[in-house]
């Protein structure tokens, strides 16, 4: 399907259908419908009786096979979750063996006699070896094969991969469009969740995670040492990666920084009074120092280090910041 906020981009593709490239790269914000757009494009490329505007008919054999996720000429590369393993704290990747398996298949003759389509998402999920393997194919693409790459982080892709794709930015919905989409589906606290997810409405609903984040915000508003230790233990029991906590904290600190400049919050508007109170009792230099220490841990967000110990360290650091005990240069 194509979401309403991407209709114009589809019209651009349809108008230049005969000049389509061997590879598209769809870029934009996460959770705004890019992968759905790419799937729709893939189905259109494989459809045997497309409509006048090149949209898939939805009724031919190819469309039926595509809907059943069994089209023999459609290949999908995405990080695989190992069966039976706890993967919450692992950074899932697309590895070279998966790319090689696809590459071997696309050099064969098309089963349905049309195109072969390869969807890669998120493209930044490829490790370096996998990315280099795909690059070799993009440099000399097989005839009648189209690659569709989706990325939430364009700058993490190899420049050589980007240069071999026709790039299309898929914009996020407006605030009113996104809010309307959530309210139509009966999402509770739609405005607060939309703010936290940076205006991207297609986020995965996770009530337990939302409650854990709300508990953190209440703690950050009035931190206490014993409550910090309890929270670190509770977070650890949910087996969330450190990267999740770092993301939550970074957004809170940004809101506090905005409050120090007398600006409204971006991510936690329902905690505007609490972030303003924190801003009033702290100093900008200490805030930047704390944010720097937090950023330094970001590369280890999916490391096997003790998440509980890291939370205790970061939250104790935050407590000293909140109490305005020190200003670290």
Image: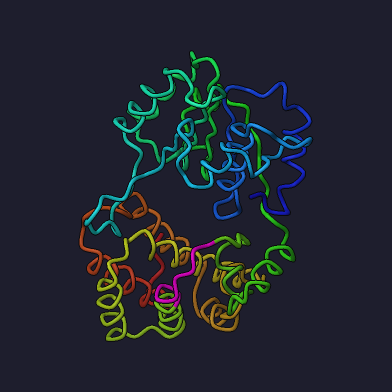
Q: Is residue 316 above or below residue 161?
A: below
Q: Position of residue 266 (x, y in %)?
A: 61, 67
Whether residue 234 is in magenta: the answer is no
Name the residue rendered at 58%, 50% in the picture: 29
Q: Is residue 158 left or right of residue 237?
A: right
Q: Percent from the top left, x then y, of residue 91?
A: 32, 49
Residue 217 lies, with reference to residue 37, above or below; the image says below
Of 64 and 178, the residue lying toward us: 64
Q: How is the image coloured?
A: rainbow
Residue at x 54%, y 65% (from the top left corner): 254
* Quarter of the image that includes the C terminus: bottom left
Residue 53 relative to residue 130: left or right: right
Q: Position of residue 270 (x, y in %)?
A: 59, 80
Residue 210 left/right relative to 177? left
x and y, in percent, of residue 70 in the image = 45, 41
Query: What range is drawn magenta here?
Result: 203-210
Q: Is residue 266 above or below residue 49?
A: below
């Amino acid at each position: 399907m194509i979401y309403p906020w991407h209709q114009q981009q589809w019209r651009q593709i349809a108008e230049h259908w005969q000049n389509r490239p061997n590879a598209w790269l769809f870029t934009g914000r996460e959770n705004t419908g890019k992968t759905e757009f790419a799937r729709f494009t893939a189905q259109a490329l494989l459809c045997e009786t497309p409509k006048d505007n090149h949209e898939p008919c939805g009724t031919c054999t190819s469309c039926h096979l595509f809907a059943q996720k069994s089209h023999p000429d459609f290949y999908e590369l995405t990080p695989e979750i190992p069966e039976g393993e706890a993967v919450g704290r692992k950074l899932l990747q697309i590895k070279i063996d998966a790319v090689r398996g696809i590459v071997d298949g696309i050099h064969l003759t098309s089963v349905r006699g049309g195109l072969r389509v390869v969807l890669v998402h998120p493209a930044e999920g490829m490790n370096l070896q996998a990315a280099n393997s795909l690059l070799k194919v993009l440099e000399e693409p097989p005839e009648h094969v189209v690659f569709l790459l989706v990325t939430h982080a364009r700058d993490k892709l190899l420049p050589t991969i980007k240069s071999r794709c026709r790039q299309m930015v898929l914009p996020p919905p407006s605030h009113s469009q996104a809010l309307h989409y959530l309210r139509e589906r009966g999402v509770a606290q739609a405005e607060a969740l939309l703010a936290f997810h940076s205006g991207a409405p297609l986020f995965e609903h996770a009530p337990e995670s939302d409650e854990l984040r709300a508990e953190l915000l209440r703690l950050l508003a009035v931190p206490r040492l014993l409550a910090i230790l309890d929270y670190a233990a509770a977070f650890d029991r949910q087996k969330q990666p450190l990267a999740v906590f770092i993301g939550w904290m970074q957004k809170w600190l940004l809101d506090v920084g905005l409050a120090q400049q007398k600006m409204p919050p971006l991510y936690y508007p329902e905690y505007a009074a609490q972030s303003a109170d924190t801003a009033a009792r702290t100093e900008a230099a200490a805030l930047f120092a704390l944010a720097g220490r937090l950023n330094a841990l970001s590369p280890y967000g999916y490391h096997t280090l003790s998440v509980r110990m890291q939370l205790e360290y970061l939250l104790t650091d935050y407590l000293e910041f909140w109490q305005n005990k020190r200003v670290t240069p």
